[in-house]
Every structure is written in structure tokens, then in C-alpha cells.
Amino acid sequence: MSAAKEGAKGSVAAWRGVVREFRAILPEIPEDAVVTLLEGGTPLVPMPALSRRAGLGLDLHVKIEGQNPTGSFKDRGMTVAVSRAKARGAKAVLCASTGNTSASAAAYAARAGLRCVVVIPEGQIALGKLAQAMIYGARVLAIRGNFDRALELVRSMSEEGSVVVVNSINPDRIQGQKTVAYEVVQALGGRVPDAHALPVGNAGNITATWKGYEERAAVASASGASGAAASASAGARPKMLGFQAEGAAPIVRGARVEDPMTIATAIKIGNPASWKGALDARDRSGGLIETVTDDEILGAYQALAEVEGIFVEPASAASVAGVLKLGAQGRLKGLHTIVCTVTGHGLKDPERAVSVSKAVEKVEDDPEVLRRVILE
Ligand SMILES: Cc1ncc(COP(=O)(O)O)c(C=O)c1O
């Protein structure tokens, strides 16, 4: 389970992807069924400038899941789900999607030689994600309803023998996604963060991340982990901090939202499939699930790029927006090391980036003019 294992002569063992790196904690997958793009092993990057902004001497990190092969955290679960589908002799995979699941399912299905069908809410998918599903060769079906309706439709197909649904209602997805927790602890030298923040949409990722921490803690306590850092954190688990967009916050409101609204299309979900998993993660960890406004999401989205050089898609910034908000409210006391999952790459949604940034300036192709403009 390490991104770079030193060999005898200083050579570095290559990362083998989620299934092979984490085989011991995943459901069984025969070697000849493994479908991988060498996902996982994503960087945990410190954010010194945003830590200062959040105050209280925080040690803030982002787990950059946009560096997975299709640009989102979905690949961690998809490698497991598609490998298991292949092992079972499936002919096709099917999903409903706000975009990233469809991109990931389409890529892994292509690699597995399976057909892929994705059902999306028409006109509500960021361009980059749609382009991915299309170029990987998926059949893209757009419905007039929203994501929740698309998922209902897909669920009704979950009993069709040779078609496997690869949304996070498929437990194999959760199994793969839980591996992120193991990577975070490893990157922190065996320490468990005090808190882990995530954007919450369908709530599969917060459910999976918490599962990873819980399972790891149970094994660490049972086996009496060795080493100072390890023994200090054996059995430790972070507080889980989930953030929904204000206009799409069914878990926070305690009721389904019929017409969710947010610029963060990836979390524009009114009836999360893993609702109970998210509540368990919140309650068992002593954490919270709260809202962030679209303005707060966009503020964090721009700050991540401008101050830390990290370009994520808007929904991803909800985790950072939430932590900055709690910091400003003085509600992070007692929490020092905080990890924010940033779930998807910024290039997924280039239109949003262009719309919130300074306009491109036209200049004459004349060195003197250029000099004046640059030095002014
Ligand atoms: C970029 C991004 N962030 C967050 C989420 C929300 O994850 P979950 O639905 O597991 O809560 C998604 C889901 O599509 C996503 O694509």
C-alpha cells in the first residue's frame, strides 16, 4: 500500500492500482478479471496559505482525487465494480450520473471490453465529463428529469442479469472508495487526521471514506500497531465533516429536496442513495454535515486555484469552503490536522473557470505595447 516502495537497490516499485495495492481489504477479484487504469495513489498536498486563512494554526491538506485517471475519485470504486462485473460475466455496465460516474464507468468498461450505458439529466452535465463519456464509447441517454429520477430509472434495471449497475448503490464502489482513508493515514506517516472534510451529493464517498477509517482503526487496535505515530493513532478516527450545497441539502434539512439547485452540478442531488451511510459517518465520528452557499463554493474554488495552484471542479471545493467557514466561525477548536477531499479535476468544467476569471486581454503584437502592458 505505498506509492513508492524502495527496492533493494534504491529502485522504486511502480504503483499497481487500487485492486492490487489493497487486495487484502477488498472483495475477491481473480487476477485475470482486474480492470485497472492504475488509479489511486493520489497526492496529499499541504495548503499553507489557506491554512493561514482558516486560522488557529491549522495543518490543512487536500487529497487531490482529480488526479485519478478519469479525473475524479470515482475511479477508485469503478476499478472494483467493473472488475467484479467482468469476473461475473456481465455484458454491460449501467449508471445514472451527474457526469463523473459516467466518465469513469465508460473508461473502465472500454478497458474491460464491456458495453456502457449512462443516463444523465439533460443539459446538466459539465462539458468535460460529457466529452469523456462520449469519447470512451458509452451510449449516452439524456432524460428531461434530474439526477434523482435518472437513478430511479437505473435502479429499476438492477435485476437484469447481464447488466451491472455501477452507481455507488453497488457495494463494490464503496469498497474501492474506502481505500482513500488508508492512503491518507499512510501519507501522514501513520497519523489519523483530526477531521476529514468532503463534498456530499449522493453520499457514497463520505460513507466509503468513513468505512475505510473505521475498518483501519479496528484492525490497528486489534493488532496493536507498532511505532510511536502508529500506536498514538491505533483506533483513532477523524471527525467526518460533510458539506452539501445550500440549494441541494436534503441531509441537512432532513427531507428530500424535489428540485435541487446549485452551480456545483456534481452534488446537485435531492435524494441521496447513501443518506443513512452519511448520517452514520457523521454520528459515529462526532462530526457534522452542514451547508455551504454557491458563493462560498466559488470563493473556495477560486482561492484553491489562485492561492495554492490547485484547480478543482466547483463541487470539489465544497469541502474546502466548509472548512474555511467553520474556521471563520471559530468552530475548529481542538482540530489541528484536517484533510479535505477535492473530488474532481478543474478541467472537467472549463466553462465555469472561464466565467469566474479575469477576461482575456487583447494586445497588439508589438514589443513596445507588450512591454508597457506588462510593466504598467
Ligand atoms: C466532483 C464530485 N464531487 C462530489 C461528488 C459527491 O460524491 P457522492 O455522490 O459520493 O456524495 C461527486 C459525485 O458525483 C462528484 O462528481
Image: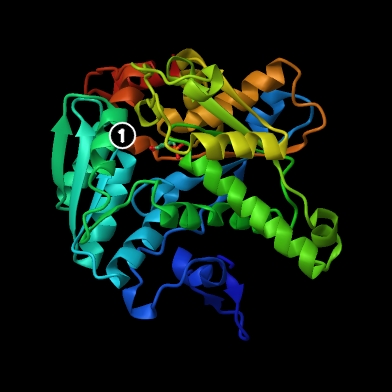
Which residue is at the front of the view, 340 or 57?
Answer: 340
Which residue is at the front of the view, 242 or 62?
Answer: 242
Is residue 371 visible from the viewing direction of this image?
yes
Image check: 142 left or right of 322?
A: left
* Residue 344 in which image quadrant: top left
| Percent of width and height locating residue 226 | 83, 68
At horizontal 26% and vertical 53% (from top left) the residue drawn is 159
| Percent of width and height locating residue 63 | 55, 45
The residue that disc 1 covers is: 98
Which residue is at the front of the view, 37 or 51?
Answer: 37
Q: In terms of image quarters, where does ligand 1 lie?
A: top left
At horizontal 72% and vertical 59% (from top left) the residue drawn is 218
Disc 1 secondary structure class = loop
Could you tell me the amino acid type at mark 1? Answer: Thr
Image check: 38 left or right of 291?
A: left
* Quadrant into which the N terminus falls: bottom right
* Residue 235 in which image quadrant: bottom right
* Residue 196 in which image quadrant: top right
* Quadrant into which the C terminus falls: top left
Is residue 358 visible from the viewing direction of this image?
no
